Structure formats: structure tokens, C-alpha cells
Image (cartoon, rainbow, N blue to C red):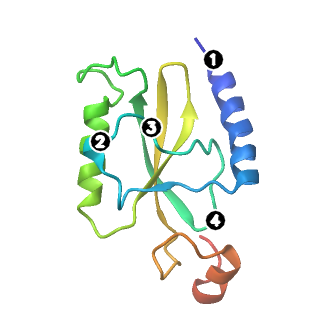
Amino acid sequence: MLSYDQIVSMAQDVGKEAKRLGKVPYSLKSLNVDTLRRFLFPNIGSYRPNGWELVNYKTCDKTGMGHEDEPALTVRGLKAWIKDLQRSDTNWAMAIIEEGEFQVVIGLFKPDSRDFTHTGCLTEGEMKIVGGAKR
């Protein structure tokens, strides 16, 4: 079993690589939840891309063998969460922010509140012009 320090270190390493590669959270708008068989979400570790705000996170079983009465979401629980989010007008997106041997932590992101396009695509410089400094 991985220690907390190992998981944090891995998230930092993954975050550096995600930043280098320009990874961003995966938009839920066009995701067909009924056909979801694996995690499509990029692993961005500790990296928080410009234009996106982390607003929530949940631990999810990644083995497919979790049970509904356990603290980590099962695949069914994850699908239900995504379907609820897809009913809103917000451009919700998800990314893996921590990963252990048996579970992942899925981060829920929304476009930065200063992003009037609601896409998560405006740069920090553009958002400073239209909406001020990040809070």
C-alpha cells in the first residue's frame, strides 16, 4: 500500500508533467456516461491549469470491485454524479488529481469565474484584463 507521502510525491511529479504537456480537465458536456468503461479524465496531479477552478473532489474506486456501501464512489456512483452535473448549464470538467493503488481522487473543475466565455480557455493574462486578479 502506498503511503500518504508517496501519493503526494506522485501527484507533484504528475502535476509537473501535466503542466509541461498542457493538460486540462476533461469537459463533461459531450461525455456519453452510459458508455463510460474507463477513466477518460487526464491525470493532472497537483497541477491547476489556468482558466480552471477546482471546486470539489471525490474518491473513486478504480478497480471496478468497489461496493456501494464503501466511502469511495463506485463506477455507478461516478456515473450518477456526472449525469447530475450534465443537467446544469455549467461547463463542468474532471481530472484525476491523486492516484493510489486502488482508488483515484477525481477533481471537479469549472471555468474560472472571470472567464466570460465559460470555456476554461482564456489565459491568466486575458482574465486579468477582463476580470481582475485571481482571488
Q: Considering only order in the chain, which callout, 3 or 1, is on the residue closer to the N terminus?
A: 1
Q: Considering only order in the chain, which callout, 4 or 2, is on the residue closer to the N terminus?
A: 2
22, 127: nearer the viewer: 22
60, 20: nearer the viewer: 20
Nearer to us of marks 2 and 4 is 2
Residue 96 relative to residue 28: left or right:
right
Q: Amino acid at mark 2?
A: Thr
How far separated are the C-alphas under marks 1 and 4? Answer: 30 Å
Q: Which numbered disc covers residue 35?
A: 2
How far separated are the C-alphas under marks 1 and 2? Answer: 33 Å
Q: Amino acid at mark 4?
A: Asn
Q: Are marks 1 and 2 in contact (CB under 8 Å)?
A: no
- The x, y position of residue 63, in whole percent, is 41, 20
For residue 134, what is the image quadrant?
bottom right
Q: Which numbered disc covers residue 50?
A: 4
Q: Residue at coordinates 65% horizontally, 82% vertically from top-left?
A: 126
Q: Which residue is mark 1?
A: 3
Q: Residue at coordinates 59% horizontally, 88% vertically from top-left?
A: 130
* Label 3 CA crowd tier, 10 Å (few <14, some 14–19, many 20+): some
For residue 110, what is the image quadrant?
bottom left
Q: Which numbered disc covers residue 39?
A: 3
Q: Residue at coordinates 59% horizontally, 70% vertically from top-left?
A: 135
